[in-house]
Image (cartoon, rainbow, N blue to C red):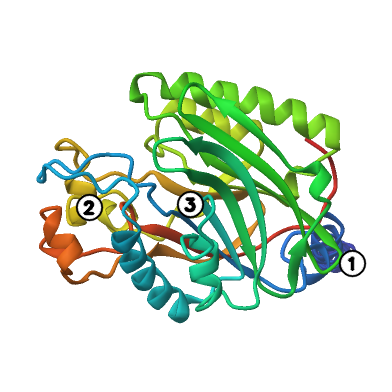
């Protein structure tokens, strides 16, 4: 009996040992097959993405009787601060809202000014969002891409309206030979209908994705996307496209994530007493690897003569801080 018991125990121990090895081998092979944590299932390199509203100066300052609408001296001063900060950050992809250019005046152009500085050598894609007759200014959704990113098929680019004052654009770009679809969003200002606008965005994006066979793993959604991270309608939008907010886990306190904040005097001067809020976001597929995520364009300077005219005590790059994320996208499996 002792011999039989010993033999049984040895066989049992051996079976557990082989089971453990088989389980480990299955795990490793399974991870490789499904693209979890393996280089082969992700892009060969990460990219840094920055989203920023350049502020069209259509909101009047509360602390001045003068309007800064159409004031390109003031705008150029702000662009100098933006250029200074971009020199330090050097994103691979910049997703701009409210980028302006004045008709008939090549020097009054956000793209031209930034292209002479930090964004020298970048390739651009711009889509007209609206035209302001009173100031002869064109407002664009814009992407600026540094190598190895490059524009894709421009015929696939489109702009869609969201309510009276909102819109979003869709553009195809390439990271080497892999396509990326960038959705650049400027939600309407009507805070009472935010849930409705997310549903409209979902519907239109779903229709366009089916038409163009967009792979959801290659989707980046960036721009003005209001709503708390915990709000049901915002979470529903993320689930619809299997997205995650790239700021998640990178803000020790809530103020770290705030892009609209009263500490920024331009925001304070135009926000009618609103408290700090996180509204500028970058969303990517849930399997994306996010290495870093933080606010940018958040450094003030000494107030200028033009700033003093509008009741400012310090000089800020733009109305809301930018958001910057370094991430790596998974490669494609299915479409939206």
Badge 1 crowding class, 10 Å Cα cut-off, few under 14, some 14 to 19, many 20 or more, is few
**Quarter of the N terminus within the rendering:** bottom right
Of labels 1 and 2, earlier in sequence is 1
Residue for point 55% across, 46% down? 140
Q: Comparing marks 1 and 2, which lies closer to the viewer? A: 2
Say which residue appears at 45% left-offset and 28% top-offset: 165
Image location (x, y in percent) of residue 11:
89, 65
From the image, tell me which residue sits under label 2: 266
Q: Which residue is mark 1?
A: 7
Q: Contact, CB < 8 Å: mark 1 with mark 2?
A: no
Q: Secondary structure at mark 2?
A: helix
CA distance separating discs 1 and 2: 81 Å
Q: Nearer the viewer, residue 7 or 327?
A: 327
Q: Position of residue 302 (x, y in %)?
A: 16, 74
- Which secondary structure lies at badge 1? helix
Q: On the rendered structure, is 156 left or right of 202?
A: right
Q: Which residue is mark 3?
A: 100
Asked which quadrant contains residue 3, the reply is bottom right
Residue 91 visible at all: yes
In three-dimensional space, the C-alpha distance between marks 2 and 3, rounded to whole angstroms, equals: 18 Å
212 over 97 or under it: above or below: above
Left or right: where does residue 254 sit relative to residue 210?
Answer: left
């Amino acid at each position: 009996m002792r011999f039989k018991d010993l033999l049984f125990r040895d066989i049992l121990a051996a079976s557990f040992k082989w089971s453990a090895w088989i389980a480990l081998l299955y795990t490793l092979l399974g991870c490789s097959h499904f693209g979890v944590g393996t280089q082969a299932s992700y892009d060969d390199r990460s990219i840094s993405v920055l989203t920023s509203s350049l502020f069209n100066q259509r909101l009047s300052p509360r602390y001045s009787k003068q309007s800064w609408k159409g004031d390109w001296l003031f705008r150029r001063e702000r662009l100098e601060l933006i250029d200074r900060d971009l020199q330090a950050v050097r994103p691979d992809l910049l997703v701009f809202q409210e980028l302006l250019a004045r008709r008939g005046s090549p020097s009054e152009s956000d793209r031209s000014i930034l292209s002479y500085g930090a964004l020298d050598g970048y390739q651009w894609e711009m889509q007209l969002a609206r035209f302001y007759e009173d100031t002869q200014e064109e407002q664009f959704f814009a992407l600026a891409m540094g190598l190895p990113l490059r524009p894709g098929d421009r015929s696939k680019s489109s702009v869609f309206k969201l309510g009276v004052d909102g819109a979003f654009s869709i553009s195809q770009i390439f990271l080497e030979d892999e396509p990326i679809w960038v959705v650049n969003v400027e939600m309407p200002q009507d805070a009472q209908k935010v849930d409705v606008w997310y549903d409209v965005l979902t519907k239109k994006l779903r229709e366009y994705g089916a038409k163009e066979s967009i792979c959801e793993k290659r989707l980046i959604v960036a721009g003005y996307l209001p709503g708390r991270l915990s709000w049901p309608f915002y979470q529903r939008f993320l689930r619809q496209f299997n997205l995650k907010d790239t700021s998640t886990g990178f803000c020790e306190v809530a103020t770290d994530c705030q892009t609209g904040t009263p500490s920024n005097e331009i925001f304070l001067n135009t926000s009618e007493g609103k408290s700090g809020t996180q509204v500028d976001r970058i969303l990517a597929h849930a399997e994306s690897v996010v290495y870093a995520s933080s606010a940018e364009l958040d450094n003030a300077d000494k107030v200028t003569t033009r700033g003093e005219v509008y009741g400012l005590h310090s000089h800020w790059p733009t109305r809301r801080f930018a958001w910057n994320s370094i991430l790596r996208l998974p490669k494609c499996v299915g479409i939206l």
